[in-house]
Amino acid sequence: MERVLKHKFPVGTRVLFTASNVARPAASGSYEVIRLLPTDRAQVGAFNDKIQLSGRFTNNRDELISALNDLQFGNPTRLNDAIATSLDVFQRTDRPNQFVILGAWADQKAFETHNAGDAAKKLKEKLATMLAAPTDTRQHNGLSVAPAKAGKDAIFAVTHVDVIPPEKDNGANALEQLADGSRRHAGNLQFDVWRQTNRPNHFTVVESWANRGAFDVHEMQKETREFRMRLGPMSGALYDERLYRAL
């Protein structure tokens, strides 16, 4: 039997995972690639004892099929043991030499397996001579997360929010209210709040908007301005908001 496992990324891009214990895995994946619409972008991958992903999202069918043929299909893995991941890479709009990678993992073990895997090691090796500063990895749990909507040429904001420890619960409550209200604003595609696992008074807000105009209007909405006024006395550091485009 042939099966293709589909996982939809928050930005609306589809990644095709081909199970390693199917009869003809590459053929199954190729069928899905051929069905791509002109506006679709895809990345192909496989899982067995490790996750493998092709290099980039693309609409080039020949490139995707070639990537399928290069995948290594090893020992079979039960579906429940597969590592469900979401991985997105963004480039800062005003400082294009700065990037952020956002990854979601099924559990801590899945993250550790990825971090010790070949892909992560190769990335670190390639970046070693180019980094102007060390990478900064922060682990979070979802505080307020909702399904994202797809958007073409969306703009993303990633914000670090730091409140003083005694205000961690009030800070979390304020961020949850902001997320709930912001998802109703025109042009919003995503508004998620994540809480750092080892520092519960630190949060990361990930939002996406249909365009820069929608983001700018949101910034001046009553709920947004009230949130920042409320956050002020609780803050442990400056509100660090940075804008990005997806790669």
Image (spheres, helix red, strand yellow):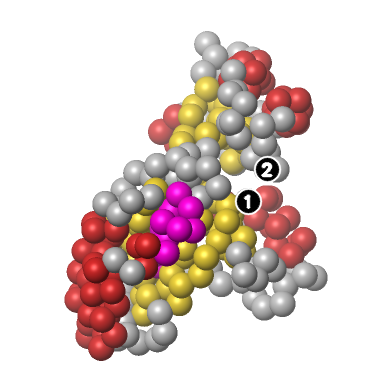
Say what secondary structure mark 1 lies in.
Answer: loop
Write the start and end of the magenta stretch as one range: 204-216
Left or right: residue 186 versus residue 120 is: left
Left or right: residue 193 versus residue 14 is: left
Q: Pick the residue in front: 39 or 64.
A: 39
Residue type for callout 1: Leu
Residue type for callout 2: Arg
Residue 125 sits in quarter? bottom right
Left or right: residue 212 versus residue 98 is: left
Left or right: residue 169 versus residue 121 is: left
Q: Is residue 147 above or below residue 115?
A: above
* Residue at the spot 42% in from the left edge and 60% down from the top edge: 215
Look at the numbered discs 1 and 2 and tell me whether their residues touch, using CB distance below 8 Å. yes
Q: Which mark, by number, is residue 56?
A: 2
Q: Pick the residue in front: 212 or 56.
A: 212
The residue positioned farthest toward the right in the image shown: 129
Whether residue 5 appears in magenta in the rendering, the answer is no
Compare marks 1 and 2 and give the one earlier in the sequence: 2
Q: Which mark, by number, is residue 247?
A: 1
C-alpha gap between disc 1 and disc 2: 9 Å
- Report how many numbered discs are placed on residues in the image: 2
Say what secondary structure mark 2 lies in.
Answer: loop
Mark 2 neighbour class, 10 Å CA radius: few under 14, some 14 to 19, many 20 or more: few
| Rendering coords of residue 11 (x, y %) | 48, 45
Residue 31 sits in quarter? top right
| Rendering coords of residue 184 (x, y %) | 26, 52
